[in-house]
């Protein structure tokens, strides 16, 4: 199993934003020193739930500050970006990182209507914007002689993109999936996936759907194994010397994190009467610690990670920093995980196929 860190730092106080960013950069350096494979960046605006806000700018900082670790987006909110500007920025970061970039593609948030409002975008257009932007992104990276595009949202006449991507034909890309339909569609194409927090049973079921769709599409066993090796599922984690200590710190931090992430949504609902998603829907797995949180001593966490590995996922995106945790707590948890848990679970890495 492969391990990576989801950098999702909360900042509740505007006056502490800079300090939190300094701590995240220290976390980046620690992850590289401990031998973690990848870092993942999110994108959220206006609410302090993701202190660095802009994953593209922050990825450039990480690329310049590291030598080995891969840098991924989980995900950049495509519907909020101009696709040509994004193509240029990611091509540049691909060069600075010497091909360490993983471009996670997704529509953007399914929950925070205020992010679309802040950018002046109708949230109901987000999926269509994403699909059009993703196509433009690929065309910009691969066109050798420039191209024209006339679509619903963009009317473009583009000369050859500069710089050309370091990775040919384009940076490694991967799509987010949040439903059985989307993971089945990716399976038919034999493409790897990013899966949001789900129970282990749901994760196992959806990976089985992906595999079945790939096999029915005639994709060979080697290609299936390679794509699953490049696929990632998300969990939160906290490791301490004992189960009791881990639960004392980890569970309240997880709860506080979920409350803070819902606060702005609740405020917008109270003030505007607007909410994304379906009212009355059952609580998602991402807010249920039984499914979203791996917490305990190194032995307990290793056992819980074995259960995740049994789902068939190639790698796990682990969020170590939850809510109001101190950096010292995150540093200790990360170190315990990589020194005492990961050696029990690590397997030879599956090499990334450039341009997948």
Image: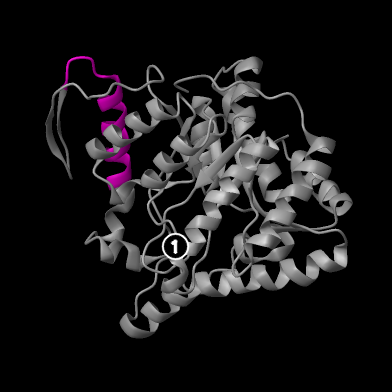
- How many other residues sit within 10 Å of disc 1, few (<14), some (14-19) or many (≥20)? few
Residue 310 spot, x, y in % from top left: 78, 39
Residue 236 spot, x, y in % from top left: 66, 56
Horizontally, residue 20 falls left or right of residue 52, namely right
Residue at the image position 37 percent from the left and 17 percent from the top: 169
Residue 4 spot, x, y in % from top left: 63, 41
Q: Report the magenta stretch's main SS.
A: helix
Residue at the image position 53 percent from the left and 69 percent from the top: 281
Magenta span includes 144: yes
Horizontally, residue 257 falls left or right of residue 86, namely right
Magenta span includes 276: no
Query: Would residue 8 be visible to someone looking at this image?
Result: no
Horizontally, residue 74 falls left or right of residue 306, namely left
Task: Find the magenta span and give its range.
Answer: 129-146
Mark 1 — residue?
18
Query: Would residue 350 be visible to someone looking at this image?
Result: yes
Residue at the image position 45 percent from the left and 46 percent from the top: 75
- Choose between 14 and 116: the one closer to the eye: 14
């Amino acid at each position: 199993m492969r391990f990576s860190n989801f950098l999702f730092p909360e900042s509740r106080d505007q006056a502490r934003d800079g300090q939190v960013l300094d701590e995240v950069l220290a976390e980046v350096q620690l992850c590289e020193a401990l031998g973690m494979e990848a870092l993942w960046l999110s994108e959220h605006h206006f609410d302090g739930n993701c202190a660095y806000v802009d994953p593209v700018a922050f990825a450039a900082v990480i690329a310049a500050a590291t030598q080995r670790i891969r840098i991924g987006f989980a995900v950049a909110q495509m519907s909020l970006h101009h696709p040509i500007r994004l193509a240029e920025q990611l091509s540049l970061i691909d060069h600075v990182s010497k091909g360490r970039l993983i471009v996670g593609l997704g529509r953007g948030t399914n929950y925070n209507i205020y992010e679309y409002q802040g950018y002046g975008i109708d949230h109901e257009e987000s999926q269509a914007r994403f699909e059009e932007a993703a196509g433009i992104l690929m065309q910009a990276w691969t066109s050798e002689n420039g191209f024209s595009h006339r679509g619903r949202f963009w009317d473009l006449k583009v000369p050859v993109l500069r710089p050309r991507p370091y990775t040919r034909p384009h940076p490694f890309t991967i799509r987010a999936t949040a439903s059985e339909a989307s993971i089945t569609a990716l399976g038919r194409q034999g493409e790897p996936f990013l899966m949001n927090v789900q129970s282990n049973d749901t994760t196992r079921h959806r990976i089985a759907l992906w595999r079945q769709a790939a096999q029915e599409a005639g994709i060979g066993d080697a290609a299936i194994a390679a794509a699953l090796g490049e696929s990632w599922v998300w969990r939160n984690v906290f490791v301490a010397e004992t189960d009791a200590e881990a639960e004392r710190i980890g569970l309240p931090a997880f709860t506080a994190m979920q409350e803070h992430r819902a606060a702005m949504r609740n405020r917008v609902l109270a003030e505007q009467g607007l909410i994304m998603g379906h009212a009355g829907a059952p609580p998602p797995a991402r807010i249920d610690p039984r499914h979203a949180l791996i917490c305990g001593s190194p032995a307990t966490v290793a056992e819980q990670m074995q259960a995740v590995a049994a789902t068939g996922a190639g790698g796990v995106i682990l969020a170590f920093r939850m809510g109001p945790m101190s950096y010292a707590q995150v540093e200790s948890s990360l170190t315990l995980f990589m020194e005492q848990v990961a050696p029990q679970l690590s397997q030879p890495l599956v090499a990334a196929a450039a341009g997948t």
